[in-house]
Image (cartoon, grey):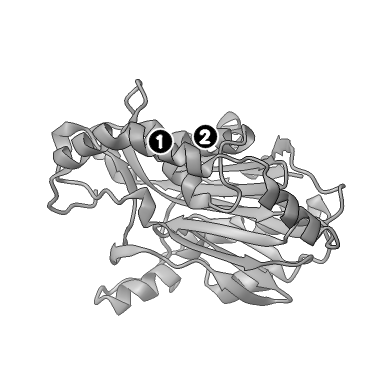
Amino acid sequence: MYARTRSMQLAITYGRVLTRALLNRINGVYSYSSNSTDVACVARCSSKRDLRLLTASCGFPKDWSTFSASLLRKGRFGDDACFIAKYKTSDVLGVADGVGGWRTYGIDPSLFSYSLMEACERLVSTGHFNPQCPAGIIAASYYELLESKQQIIGSSTACVIILNRTDHTVYTANIGDSGFLVVRQGRIIHRSEEQTHYFNTPYQLSLPPPSVTGQVLSDSPESAVTSSFQVQEGDLILVATDGLFDNLPENMILQELSKLRDQCVENVQQVVNSLALQARRLAFDATYLSPFALRARENGIDAVGGKPDDITILLAFVGGGDNLDLQTVVARNTGCMDYG
């Protein structure tokens, strides 16, 4: 459990007092609605071919005893969670990594991350979001959990991206050390900015019980790092928890992505499966000099080996045409889940 001195009781009380006001603000600002500006944008972009995401996902729980096909179909890999959703002209992807230290207090760490992603997916599917503001999706989902009658306790990182199909713009928001890469013709053209308080201590959204007030980190959802950029047909967007990035360096990720030659869902699935399998194998290799071990050494810690962790990866091919759509398919016996 990550610890630091903070008056969490005051923060929680203050947060609950202001939550309804914040939600009213968020719902007002982050609700999707058509207006003259939207119409003008559509008119300007009408000459462009709409883009869509062809997305496949794969993941593994750190503890294989928690493997469950039913959980995989729900986007849960150990303490990690993810979602894939769409609404009108937006395709939305998200991942969250639950903080495992909550087991010390007898709390299931996966409940918070899963509930957060479930709330994000519901907001997108019902259109209660601003298609240019993924940070708003994270914030509204967090405040929804804060106000839930069923107390949800835990912490997690979060990363959400939105593709606007008509103007070819991707909007991103990231809290902590989950993140994304955008690859074009074998080169990384955009990457997320990792947020950490110190080594192996990422920013995280938290809902702690009063009994551990002042003993856990709790960052504001408004602290998310945001960005926006144009994408084009053929780009690849990878969104993942740190179980991937701590065990596979970017050159190995690029090498695997180079095997993807077309927009066939089976090929996208094979590549994301391979990435997850490699990350899991190396995570348990005690002699491997992993990206995590290298960062540990940079911080004065003599470390070697991979970092055993839950792994969740979403891989999206940016394509054109109405034939690319999102629907849940099946959970594969590799521990992977695919969407086409």
Q: Secondary structure at mark 1?
A: helix
Residue pushed farthest front?
A: 36
Q: Does residue 302 lie above or below 35 as drawn? A: below
Camera-side mark, 1 or 2: 1
The crowd level at tag 1 (other Cα within 10 Å; few <14, some 14-19, many 20+) is some
Instruction: Name the residue at 72% across, 36% down.
Output: 330
| Badge 1 amino acid | Leu
Left or right of 17, for residue 272: right
Ranked by sequence position, the earlier of labels 1 and 2 is 1
Task: For residue 113, say whether it is visible.
Answer: no
- Judge from the rendering whether residue 301 lies leftward or rightward of residue 304; answer left or right: left
Q: Residue under circle 1? A: 23
- Quadrant hosting residue 332: top right
Q: Give the camera-side residue of 208 and 312.
A: 208
Q: Residues within 10 Å of mark 2 (few under 14, many from 20)?
A: some
Q: Residue at x 32, y 35 (%)?
A: 19
**Residue 329 location (% of width, % of height):** 74, 37
Asked whether residue 318 appears in the rendered view, the answer is yes
Marks 1 and 2, how far apart at CA: 17 Å
Q: In terms of secondary structure, where does tag 2 sit?
A: helix
Q: Is 146 located above or below residue 266 in the figure?
A: above
Question: Is residue 2 depicted above or below 113 in this figure?
Answer: below
Residue 322, given in percent of the width and then of the height, sits at: 86, 48
The numbered mark at residue 198 is: none
* Residue indicated by mark 2: 118
Which amino acid type is shown beneath numbered disc 2?
A: Glu
Task: Say above or below: 292 vs 319.
Answer: below
Front-lying residue, 13 or 153: 13
